[in-house]
Image: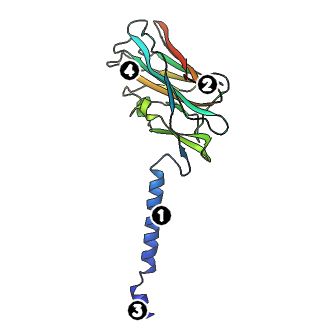
Amino acid sequence: MADERKIRPPRGALIVIAIGLLATVAAALLSTDKPLGAATLEWVEESSLPNPKPVAIPGGGEMTLSNAAIRSTEPNAGDYTLFRSSALLTIGAGSAVGHGRLRCTIVVPKQTIIAKTPKSRASYPRSSDNLADQEIHDTSLVEFSSHSTDLASVEVGDILGSRYTREPGIVVEWPPFRIGRQVWQLGLPAGRPEKPLRLPFISIWRTTTTPAARISCTIETAAGSTTVKTAGALQGQG
């Protein structure tokens, strides 16, 4: 027994080792946005929406929508499909948009419900005092019943990129929610952008009907207003 006590690690050392293991596990959990038990879902179908022609901005310049698309998962046991609608708005370099108000909207059909994250709507970007500082994640965690769990992780980083914009001073606000639509209101900084201003946006939905969306962006300045828009549905469904 005396020899066994000599080779046994001191109790204090064991406590230190246990604390270290717990800290390692905690750090691993905090390093990911996906909690244990969340299902990773793939976008299995995709339809691109038409690219509209660029529209002239009052006072000079133009803007257009591109990369507009709808992507969906397979239906779950309740016949709900999770889908995302997204687009990239590009405002040309030198456009007269200083102190302008920009409003981008996604409208979806009836029988469609906005998906929710554990904290908010699954729409990006979120309200922000400076869009350039807003963090981006590669995936979105949404409440969706699939694979015996109520949480699903889906990809969003492919459309959002590594950051929303490099242009400082852009303010984003979500107006009060209305069923069947997601709206972003953006306040643009003074002056004309020296480089093309690219602004991605995306919203995730769940539906029992064919995924579809109407997407539009309207810029308002002291010189007037103009709108660019596109629309479409997931082909091969419905």
Q: Residue at horizontal 34%, vertical 15%?
A: 93
Q: Earlier in the sequence, mark 1 or mark 4?
A: 1
Residue 78: x and y in percent read: 67, 37
Which residue does the numbered mark 4 point to in the structure image? 197
Query: Mark 2 Cα within 10 Å, few/some/many (few <14, many 20+)?
Result: some
Q: Earlier in the sequence, mark 3 or mark 2?
A: 3
Which residue does the numbered mark 1 point to in the structure image? 22
Contact, mark 1 vs mark 2 (Cβ under 8 Å): no
Query: Mark 4 Cα within 10 Å, few/some/many (few <14, many 20+)?
Result: some
Q: CA distance from mark 3 to mark 2?
A: 74 Å
* Amino acid type for the residue under numbered disc 2: Thr
* Amino acid type for the residue under numbered disc 1: Leu
Residue 148: x and y in percent read: 62, 48
Q: CA distance from mark 1 to mark 4?
A: 46 Å
Q: Mark 3 or mark 2, which is nearer to you?
A: 2
Which residue does the numbered mark 2 point to in the structure image? 210
Q: CA distance from mark 1 to mark 2?
A: 47 Å
